[in-house]
Amino acid sequence: MVDSLFAYGTLLAPELLHSVIGRRIEGAPAVLDDYVCRRVRRAAYPAITKLAGASTRGNLYRGIDKLGWQRLDDFESSLYERQLVEATQLDGSPMTAYTYVIADPHKERLTDEAWNFEDFRRLHLQRYLNHLPN
């Protein structure tokens, strides 16, 4: 089973990822080609969808175990589908990883607005952390 996650949104915050999966894990920068990241309507978080020529920056996290995947699936909810993708690491080498792509029934919730991680960190991260189990 693939044990790598490509995170592009709220899970870029190490403290949030730690709270979700229950342990600390280091990430490394990567890019996912042919996917665009957009803000979800009436939400503080983004989603990605396929778009030829686009690219989404994020982090690759290795070593996600079965319990970690279960917790991630619960966190991401039915808004997303976990899919295998091929991300590109900084050294140019590809890595197969799972990521969460907006599910087809929810695509109409995507806006045309880019999502900004620093705005999320400043305005919304603490609220997310306060609502997760310890």
Image: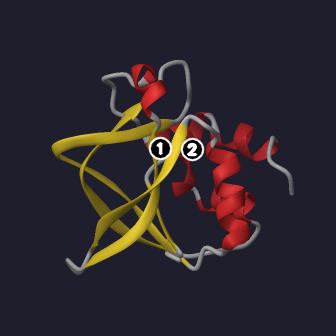
- Amino acid type at circle 1 is Glu
Q: Circle 1 sits in a helix, a strand or a loop, which is it?
A: helix
Identify the residue at horizontal 72%, vertical 57% (top origin).
71
Question: As rendered, which of 51 and 31 lies closer to the eye?
Answer: 51
Residue at position x 47%, y 26% in the image: 105
**In the picture, residue 122 is in which quadrant?**
top right
Graded by Cα atoms within 10 Å as few (under 14), some (14 to 19) or many (20 or more), the crowding at tag 1 reads few
The residue where tag 1 is placed is 118
* Quadrant occupied by the C terminus: bottom right
Q: CA distance from mark 1 to mark 2?
A: 5 Å
For residue 121, the mark is: 2
Disc 1 vs disc 2: Cβ atoms closer than 8 Å? yes
Q: Is residue 49 left or right of residue 41?
A: left
* Percent coordinates x, y for residue 67 in the rendering: 73, 68
Residue in the picture at 45% in, 56% down: 99
The amino acid at mark 2 is: Arg
Specify the farthest residue to the right: 134
